[in-house]
Amino acid sequence: MAVVRLSDVIVPEVFFSYMVSDTMVKSNVFTSGIVQPDAFMASALAGGGRVFQHPTWGDLDNSDPVVVNDNPASVITPKKISAFKHQFIRQVNAQSWSSALLTQELAGSNPMQRIISRVSDYWARYFNRMVISTITGIINDNIANDGGDMVYSAGVGVGGATPSAAISAAAILEA
């Protein structure tokens, strides 16, 4: 007697519908409120160009004032203020995604709908990385060229305070 065995049949593969897997990386810089719109930057970016320069007056130095006396020969020497230019670079970036129509037909799910639903989160994560890299560059430049006057260390690390002990009212005000 002949028996139909597993080796004689085609067992179809059964797939469930596509699941989605979102990254755990979030854009904390923009959602925290640290970055705010700026009218000057908006007006600069409204025009063309990749590099913008803006003249800026520096601050008064921190030298001590002169003690005044009644000697007519005593003269106060005037000090000056310096100017410098800020340079801004327009970030011009692009990204694109695509999907073949056959892919949707065979997969039974539209990959472009998934792409569309994730584009804004993609750019938020990118801008987050860009802002952090820019801030890191500003801090590194400040350390290399200006003695690190924009940097405050709460002494966290080897031989220093623990992170929880380093955050205090005094440290926040100093920073």
Image: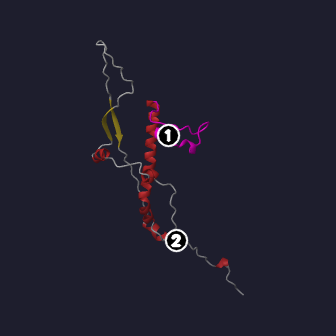
Q: Is residue 175 something one can see in this rendering?
A: no
Q: How is the image coloured?
A: secondary structure
Circle 2/circle 1 CB separation < 8 Å: no
- Kindly indicate the quadrant of the structure image that contains residue 62: top left
Percent x, y of residue 116: 41, 62
Drawn side of residue 161 relative to residue 65, left or right: right
Task: Tell me the crowding category of disc 1: few under 14, some 14 to 19, or many 20 or more residues within 10 angstroms, Cα based.
Answer: few
Q: Quadrant of the N terminus?
A: bottom right
Q: Residue furthest front?
A: 70
The structure residue drawn at horizontal position 35% and vertical position 29%, both measured from the top left corner, is 60
The vertical placement of 173 against 113, above or below, is above
Q: Main secondary structure of the magenta part?
A: loop
Percent x, y of residue 68: 33, 19
| Label total for image | 2
Percent x, y of residue 146: 43, 30
- Kindly indicate the quadrant of the structure image that contains residue 11: bottom right
Q: Nearer the viewer, mark 2 or mark 1?
A: 1
SS at mark 1?
helix
The vertical placement of 28 against 60, above or below, is below
The structure residue drawn at horizontal position 65% and vertical position 79%, both measured from the top left corner, is 8
Residue sitting nearer the eye, 84 or 8 = 84
Residue bearing the label numbered 2: 17
Drawn side of residue 107 relative to residue 33, left or right: right
Task: Tell me the crowding category of disc 2: few under 14, some 14 to 19, or many 20 or more residues within 10 angstroms, Cα based.
Answer: few
Drawn side of residue 170 relative to residue 13, left or right: left
Query: Mark 2 and mark 1: span between their CA atoms?
Result: 55 Å
The boundaries of the magenta stretch are 147-174
User: At label 1, which amino acid type do we have?
Assistant: Ala
The vertical placement of 137 against 113, above or below, is above
Return the disc, 2 or 1, that comes first in the chain's sequence: 2
Residue bearing the label numbered 1: 170
